[in-house]
Amino acid sequence: MPPVLNPALMVAYLLLQPLRAWIIASLGRYWTTRIITLPGVPLVRRGPYRFMRHPNYVLVALEIAILPLAVGAWRSRSCFRS
């Protein structure tokens, strides 16, 4: 049986992507895939960083929750193996 696509959740997932661009743009030249702290460099306080300290963590958590639900993969088969 093919997975059923949930249009509302797929739209929600797609609406998160501009937030990712905003996060990356707010960090500017300091953006990296690694978590690093540069001595003597002040914390970023613009964009979504005005509202929370680690907006990318929230974004990734939402994506991990929404995308499987959007494509009908709400449970993992590995959890149910005997």
Image (cartoon, grey):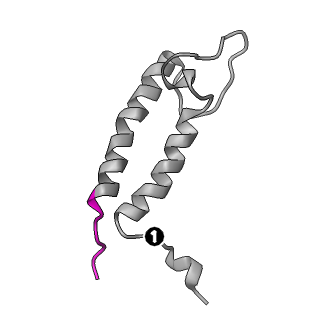
In percent of width and height, residue 37 lies at: 69, 23
Furthest toward the bottom, the residue is 82
Task: Determine whether, in the image, residue 35 is placed left or right of residue 68.
Answer: right
Image: 31 above or below 67: above
Please identify the dominant SS of the magenta region: loop
Q: Regarding mark 1 in the picture, which secondary structure is present there?
A: loop
58 or 2: nearer the viewer: 58
Residue name at image x 64 percent, y 16 percent: 43
Q: Decide: few, some or many residues near mark 1? Use Cα within 10 Å; few <14, some 14-19, many ≥20.
A: few
Q: Residue furthest right?
A: 39
Q: Which residue is found at the position 34% from the left and 65% from the top?
A: 71
Q: Is residue 43 above or below residue 52?
A: above
Q: Position of residue 11 (x, y in %)?
A: 29, 50
Q: Is residue 19 above or below residue 39?
A: below
Q: Amino acid at mark 1?
A: Trp
Q: Position of residue 51 (x, y in %)?
A: 56, 26
Side of 43 relative to 78 (left or right): right
The residue indicated by pointer 1 is 74
Residue at 58% from the left image edge and 17% from the top image edge: 44
Q: Is residue 67 above or below residue 58?
A: below
The quadrant the C terminus occupies is: bottom right
Report the residue at 55% width, 78% height from top. 78
> Which residues, given as a range, are shown in magenta?
1-7
**Figure disc tally:** 1
Q: In this rendering, would 79 be left or right of 12?
A: right
Examine the image and state in which quarter residue 19 appears.
top left
> What quarter of the picture does the N terminus occupy?
bottom left
Image spot of residue 54 (x, y percent): 60, 32
Q: Residue 30 is drawn in which quadrant?
A: top right
Q: Is residue 6 magenta?
A: yes
Residue 75 in magenta stretch: no
